[in-house]
Image (cartoon, helix red, strand yellow):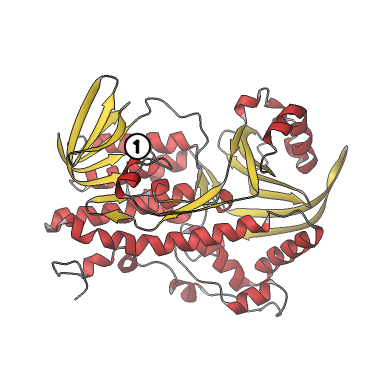
């Protein structure tokens, strides 16, 4: 079998890439080892930049029909009491509306629904989109991709091979890249439970020693994320489900009934956060996207978004090479030039967010409360934080920003205008810089 592009992995990143390529007349083969929905929790929060990409792919209406909008994130600090409602210490609200874009919200969509919508869109371009479910990518043999389903083996010759397999990546292994990894002192328990229809905002509730993230889904459900110490999972299970019932109820009484819908530990998944980043996204005609190239701490909800944003840049590059009769391998560096610095930036931002909730000291909590509150009171801090996590642009924090956030300088009263923000939104030239190049070696004139 021959094709223009082979993609190992049919997750949201691989499918988003395949849809863009097929739409532009590039032949693509996608090998996906799963034949049914995965029971493993994966990302559900779609950030504004990702929504803009999905709009260009022609699936935004279907995505929005399946999603619950998140226009605000609430950060609530409480003191808990047994058999009593929590005592609110502080409440800070961060708003996507502060970003100068018509994509003024994020969207919670069940992961498998996003995959199904992208796959259906790809099938619309059936002349170019070729999807192989149940086929495991086994690596490379004589320069070709080898996929296998039971006793059937297919060798695929492509001009470009894309590793979108996730954390365990044969493509990455074949590239022999270096991986820099970091582990954390905490894990998470995650489960979806019923919610009251009035519980509609994203919310993070913290006490001196506990953390509960709540992200509403459609159909009156909510994705919950509960922080535990690393290695504590076994002892918590031994305490029984009553431990979760009490912990959730003490932090958020509105969910005290919904949490009791958990009737088996099998529905509660353990998430072990860690980060890694490869030193190179491409080698020859091999290229990595998504978790094959980088894994981000889940605190900022960026993992799936980075994969789709990878797919957007790489897809645009490969389609352009096809249309302009450019040699793919000579231009792959542009993909890394665009995406690696942005991923590095968000890896760092997510890491800092993780540190904020990693330590259970009263003095650390006070620092956290003051820092979060100042992000609301100082509009420049507010705008920068929401702009950066949205993916729509990048506006670095200065030492003055951090001094204001830390309380060493007073809060600034100036309101940031949309005009000023536009300087920091990613332009089409920044997303797709190769379009300004006409040289054969892929460099700028």
Judge by depth and name the residue closer to the eye, 326 or 380: 326
Q: How many labels does the image show?
A: 1
Which image quadrant is residue 255 in? top right
Judge by depth and name the residue closer to the eye, 170 or 205: 170
Residue visible at 39% across and 46% down in the picture: 292
Which image quadrant is residue 166 in? top left
Residue visible at 26% across and 31% down in the picture: 147
At numbered mark 1, what does the secondary structure look like: helix, strand or loop? loop
In this rendering, the answer to whether 311 lies above or below 239 is below
Q: Is residue 384 left or right of residue 324?
A: right
Q: In this view, does 368 lie to the left or right of 97?
A: right
Tell me if I can see residue 67 in this picture.
yes
Residue that sits furthest to the left in the current view: 325
Where is residue 186 drawn, in percent x and y? 65, 47
**Other-residue count near label 1 (Cα within 10 Å), few / some / many at <14 / 14–19 / ≥20:** many
Image quarter in which the C terminus is found: bottom left
Where is residue 338 drawn, in percent x and y? 35, 63
Residue visible at 18% across and 36% down in the picture: 156
Where is residue 64 drawn, in percent x and y? 46, 43
In this rendering, the answer to whether 93 lies above or below 32 is below
Tell me if I can see residue 95 in this picture.
no
Image quarter in which the N terminus is found: top left
Where is residue 145 drawn, in percent x and y? 23, 37
- The residue where tag 1 is placed is 10
């Amino acid at each position: 079998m021959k094709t223009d592009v082979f993609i190992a992995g049919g997750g949201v990143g691989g499918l988003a890439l395949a849809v863009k390529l097929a739409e532009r007349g590039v032949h693509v083969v996608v090998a996906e080892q799963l034949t049914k929905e995965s029971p493993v929790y994966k990302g559900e929060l779609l950030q504004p930049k990702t929504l803009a990409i999905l709009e260009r792919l022609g699936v935004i209406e279907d995505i929005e029909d399946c999603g619950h909008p998140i226009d605000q994130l609430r950060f609530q600090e409480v003191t808990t009491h047994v058999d009593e409602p929590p005592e609110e210490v502080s409440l800070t609200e961060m708003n996507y509306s502060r970003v100068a874009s018509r994509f003024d919200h994020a969207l919670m969509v069940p992961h498998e629904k996003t995959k199904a919508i992208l796959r259906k869109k790809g099938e619309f371009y059936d002349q170019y989109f070729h999807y192989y479910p149940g086929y495991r990518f086994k690596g490379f043999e004589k320069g070709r991709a080898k996929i296998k389903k039971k006793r059937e083996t297919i060798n695929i010759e492509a001009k470009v091979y894309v590793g979108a397999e996730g954390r365990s990546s044969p493509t990455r292994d074949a590239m022999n890249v270096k991986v820099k990894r970091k582990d954390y002192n905490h894990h998470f328990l995650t489960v979806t439970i019923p919610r009251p229809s009035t519980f509609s905002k994203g919310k993070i509730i913290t006490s001196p020693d506990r953390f509960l993230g709540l992200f509403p889904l459609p159909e009156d459900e909510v994705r919950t994320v509960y922080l535990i110490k690393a290695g504590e999972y076994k002892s918590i299970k031994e305490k029984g489900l009553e431990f979760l019932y009490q912990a959730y109820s003490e932090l958020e009484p509105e969910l005290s009934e919904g949490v009791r819908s958990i009737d088996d530990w099998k529905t509660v998944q353990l998430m072990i956060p860690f980060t890694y980043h490869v030193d190179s996204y491409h080698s020859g005609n091999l290229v990595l996207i998504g978790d094959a190239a980088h894994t981000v701490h889940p605190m900022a909800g960026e993992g799936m978004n980075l994969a789709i944003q990878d797919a957007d840049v790489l897809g645009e590059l490969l389609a352009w090479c096809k249309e302009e009769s450019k040699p793919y391998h000579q231009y792959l560096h542009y993909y890394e030039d665009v995406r690696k610095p942005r991923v590095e930036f968000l890896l760092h931002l997510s890491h800092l967010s993780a540190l904020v909730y990693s330590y259970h000291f009263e003095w650390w909590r006070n620092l956290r409360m003051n820092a979060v509150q100042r992000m609301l009171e100082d509009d420049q801090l507010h705008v920068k934080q929401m702009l950066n996590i949205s993916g729509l642009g990048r506006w670095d924090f200065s030492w003055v920003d951090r001094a204001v956030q830390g309380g060493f300088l007073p809060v600034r009263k100036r309101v940031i205008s949309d005009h000023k923000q536009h300087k920091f939104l990613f332009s089409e030239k920044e997303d797709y810089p190769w379009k300004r190049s006409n040289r054969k070696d892929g460099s700028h004139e």
